[in-house]
Image: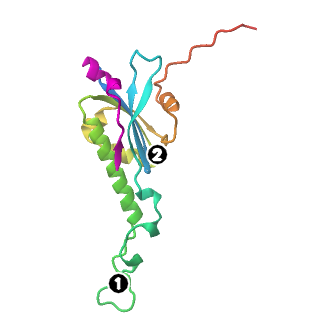
Amino acid sequence: MFHRMTTNPDRGSSSAKTGTTKRQLLIVTGLGSFKAYALDNSRLHSTARLELIEHFNPEQPHRKMADKPSDLAGRYRAAGGKGNTPFGERHNIKLEERKRLIRQLANRLNVLMSDGDVDCCYLAASKGIDQQILGALSPVAHAKIKRNLPADLIKTSKEKLLDYFGLSPEKAPVLGRVR
């Protein structure tokens, strides 16, 4: 389930206040989690800021196969067959779950980026799922992606995320004595 973070109405997007600037999103995702941040580049702050607006941690990738519901613990029987001949065993259950999770992530990205208030998006997805997510996005959402990084940055701090996407201002040189 996706969890939408509550925001302070006084700290809403700049487009709600001025009606001109659109919102930018920074999204990091892996097969096991998803985080969407609103990027605040307003002049009120000396540096860009990220505010978590939504996160998602599906329970499916974190469970063992034995813990997942199935019919009678894998006892598939052939109708009218001799003995214990297996019939209809699901060999590709892991692949099916992976595809389902990728579709869920892509659908959520489509919903977030279909908002007319969103101007562009910075996306970082794990290498193994990056191209699959891009392929599952709608043309409107795909067009809003400004920069895509095929990297697993889900546990990266907000400051480092800004660095990875080149959104943090260059550090001013430290003035001091010359030796």
Quadrant that contains the C terminus: top right
Residue under numbered circle 2: 127
Question: Above or below — where is 51 with respect to 92?
Answer: above
Say how the picture is coloured: rainbow
Q: Which mark is residue 91?
A: none
Q: Amino acid at mark 1?
A: Arg
In percent of width and height, residue 37 lies at: 39, 34
Can you tell which of label 2 and label 1 is closer to the viewer? 1
- Which portion, as a residue range, is magenta? 1-19
Q: Is residue 34 visible?
A: yes
In percent of width and height, residue 49 lies at: 44, 25
Q: CA distance from mark 2 to mark 1?
A: 39 Å
Q: Amino acid at mark 2?
A: Lys
Within-10-Å neighbours for mark 1: few <14, some 14–19, many 20+: some
Q: Is residue 136 visible?
A: no
x 51%, y 29%: residue: 159
Q: Between 119 and 151, which is closer to the camera in this rendering?
A: 119
Q: Which mark is residue 77?
A: 1
In percent of width and height, residue 45 lies at: 44, 18
Q: Which circle's residue, 2 or 1, is located before the other in the chain?
A: 1
> Is residue 29 highlighted in magenta?
no
Within-10-Å neighbours for mark 2: few <14, some 14–19, many 20+: few
x 63%, y 13%: residue: 174
In percent of width and height, residue 35 lies at: 41, 40
